[in-house]
Image (cartoon, rainbow, N blue to C red):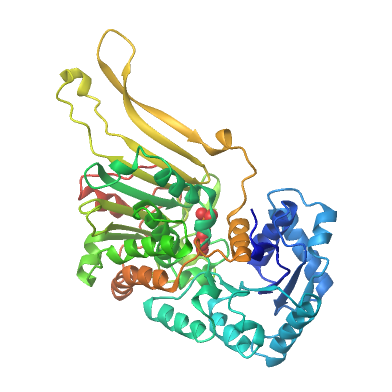
Amino acid sequence: MKNENATAPTIFLIFGATGDLTYRKLMPALYNLILDDMLPESFSVVGIGRSDMNKEQLMTKLKEGAVSFSRRPVDDEKWTLLCKNFGFINGDFADPALYENVNKAVNDFKAIHPERYNVIVYLAVSPVFFGPITKNLAPYSFIKRRDQTRFVFEKPFGHDLQSALDLNKEIMSVLRENQIYRIDHYLGKETVQNILAFRFANSFFEPLWNKNYIEWIQISSLEKVGLEGRGGYYDNSGALRDMIQNHMLQLMCMIAMEPPISFAADEIRNKKADVLHAVRKYSEQEVFQYTARGQYGAGKIGDEVIPAYRTEKNVRPDSNTETYAAAVLHIETWRWEGVPFYIRTGKNLSQKATTIAVKFKPAPSYSFPKEATNNWKSNLLVFNINPKMDIHLMFQAKVPGQMMQLSQVNMEFDFEKELTANTPEAYEHLIYDVLEGDATLFMRSDQVEAAWQIINPILNAWQNNKDLDFPNYAPGSNGPVKSDELLAKYGHTWLNP
Ligand code: BG6
């Protein structure tokens, strides 16, 4: 059932309306929400952007984006309904007049809906503008409506620990934490949310979910794509900041958190923050023992020629930026003592696959005849998050016949086959949650800071020590040999898709 917030008249202000995110993700998500009747009856989108175009040109561009990126075909009537009150404020984010115009748009909306209305301020802009835009809006009275005005911040939230602390301080001098929605789009994915259902709505795995039964956990986000024209951003970021600090640590939290006592936003976020706080922080020396990094050279994926990273547009020719990162993390709690969490991500790899694999300790084999145990394998649970969406449980079974022969078999739950409901995109989920005022799937300030505390020593060690082996992996491979060697130290191997 929709709550009061989700049905209240809403003005949705998008800073960065002429940019790529609005084009590819936000407007297609809003369109799908209106199609599912999930937007309030009175809903106005106001775009705010710097590009030199007028409202009609922007609307034409955004419709093109919806046609290309919406998961369902765009119906003219519904699109017109979404855009019936569309407004565009064109100007520079440093210009005070722009904020006067934004305030006027809010006041005009308020004049029509004096009793109750929501203001959503979506910052789909470069993070350098997060602080200035928030501060420029500070004087206006709608900011002080703590329950009805909400700000959404895109990633990356900070460049390192200090900048994240500074940014939190800056925006929290204007806003309260309950008004702030820091996006991590992985948390909006159906398959990620399902981890909570799988773990806490079923009784059969939770008793085994600890160091007594689990040998290791692997979290991989392998990407086939490369920089996609984002060389300038990526060369100052790298795989660690781009994927591990946010998405992958969040996946780890979902898998490793203690059972919540309720699904209240802060309860879930407390339990996740506990996981991050419990991760062992490495010294600069230890970093090289527990991590591996890579950068791709020139090569081919299928027929596509991939230039070496250092020759990509807007990348420094001597760049030390990693396009692949792997780490072994240790969560120092009673539950996870001694269980390694292996994490890896990279660009231009053999395929796109985001997976979480949980390897159980082997069952004792002494009661079986020797020949039956030749192929002894322990149980493996695999969550395919993206693009495949399924859960597999591998277990041993007897091969039919006179002899006691064993084979590993696979039990599968496929989202598409079993639950063919209309699956919303991550941004649809997250935008709807913002409308509802539900912050469960958003990062709280302490979570962001705790994640940076884990990553910061690795960043420093990697920055201060240039990797002389770069480039060290070929496009289309599964990453650098060093990453395999990292797991080999523990007697383990990566589970490649
Ligand atoms: C983004 C990163 O946050 O996530 C990109 O900036 C990456 O570099 C993307 O490609 C991956 O998201 P998904 O949903 O395609 O796995």
Residue 294 figure quarter: bottom left
Image quadrant containing the C terminus: top left
Q: Residue at x 47, y 81 (%)?
A: 167
Q: Residue at x 73, y 62 (%)?
A: 40
Identify which residue, 361 or 444, lies in the foreground.
444
Q: Is residue 447 left or right of residue 27?
A: left
Identify which residue, 2 or 132, lies in the foreground.
2
Using the rendered image of the protein, determine whether residue 226 is visible from the camera's viewpoint. Answer: no
Position of residue 454 relative to residue 204, above or below, is below
Using the rendered image of the protein, determine whether residue 292 is visible from the camera's viewpoint. Answer: yes
Percent coordinates x, y for residue 425 in the rendering: 61, 52
Q: Is residue 339 left or right of residue 240?
A: left
Percent coordinates x, y for residue 111 in the rendering: 80, 80
Q: Is residue 230 left or right of residue 446?
A: right
Identify which residue, 414 or 468, lies in the foreground.
414
Percent coordinates x, y for residue 405 in the rendering: 27, 17
Residue 427 figure quarter: bottom right
Position of residue 201 relative to residue 462, above or below, is above
Q: Residue at x 26, y 47 (%)?
A: 210
Position of residue 25 relative to residue 463, above or below, is above
In the current view of this chain or complex, which residue is farthest to the front? Answer: 115
Percent coordinates x, y for residue 226 in the rendering: 51, 58
In the current view of this chain or complex, which residue is farthest to the top? Answer: 402
Q: Is residue 343 left or right of residue 1?
A: left
Q: Residue at x 40, y 62 (%)?
A: 244
